């Protein structure tokens, strides 16, 4: 599996920890939208698309199954974020 496209839009919203939104395409055939780039206590991190349940908890809609894939996503998204 390869990431074939990465789009990032920086977000500047006062009082928000959200720093950007990313969309990626895998193997030119699957798109994942609304990956968030968030400012945390230890710096920026990538949060996968999620939704809030009726109980008030957030669950990921899409997420990597292994650490290698998560690292690939994070590296590609953060590289594009730092480019712009």
Image (spheres, grey):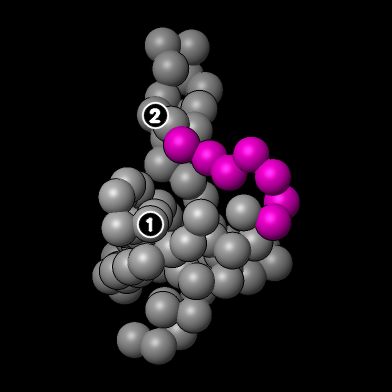
Marker disc for residue 27: 1
Q: In the image, what residue occupies the spot 64% across and 39% down? A: 65
* In the rendered image, the vertical position of residue 11 relative to residue 84, given as above or below: above
Q: Left or right: 34 with respect to 57? A: left
Q: In the image, what residue occupies the spot 49% across and 80% down? A: 79
Q: In the image, what residue occupies the spot 43% across and 31% down? A: 61
Q: Where is residue 58 in the image (x, y as percent from the top left)?
A: 49, 28
Secondary-structure class at tag 1: loop
Q: In the image, what residue occupies the spot 69% across and 45% down? A: 66
Marker disc for residue 51: 2
Magenta-colored span: 62-68
Q: In which quarter of the image is the C terminus?
A: bottom left
In this rendering, the count of numbered labels is 2
Name of the residue lying farthest toward the top: 54
Q: Left or right: 64 with respect to 16? A: right
Q: Where is residue 76 in the image (x, y as percent from the top left)?
A: 50, 71
Is 34 part of what is drawn in magenta?
Answer: no
Q: Where is residue 31 in the image (x, y as percent from the top left)?
A: 30, 49
Q: Indicate which disc, 2 or 1, sits on the residue closer to the N terminus.
A: 1
The residue carrying pointer 2 sits among few (fewer than 14), some (14 to 19) or many (20 or more) residues within 10 Å by Cα, namely few
* In the rendered image, the vertical position of residue 7 relative to residue 65, given as above or below: below
Q: Which of 9 and 23 is in front in this view?
A: 23
The residue carrying pointer 1 sits among few (fewer than 14), some (14 to 19) or many (20 or more) residues within 10 Å by Cα, namely few
Name of the residue lying farthest toward the bottom: 83
Q: Nearer the viewer, residue 82 or 67?
A: 67
């Amino acid at each position: 599996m390869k990431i074939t496209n990465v789009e990032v839009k920086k977000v500047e919203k006062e009082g928000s920890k959200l720093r950007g939104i990313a969309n990626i395409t895998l193997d030119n055939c699957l798109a994942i939208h609304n990956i968030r780039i968030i400012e945390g206590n230890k710096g920026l991190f990538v949060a996968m698309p999620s939704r809030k349940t009726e109980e008030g908890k957030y669950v990921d809609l899409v997420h990597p199954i292994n650490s290698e894939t998560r690292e690939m996503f994070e590296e590609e998204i953060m590289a594009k974020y730092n480019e712009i």
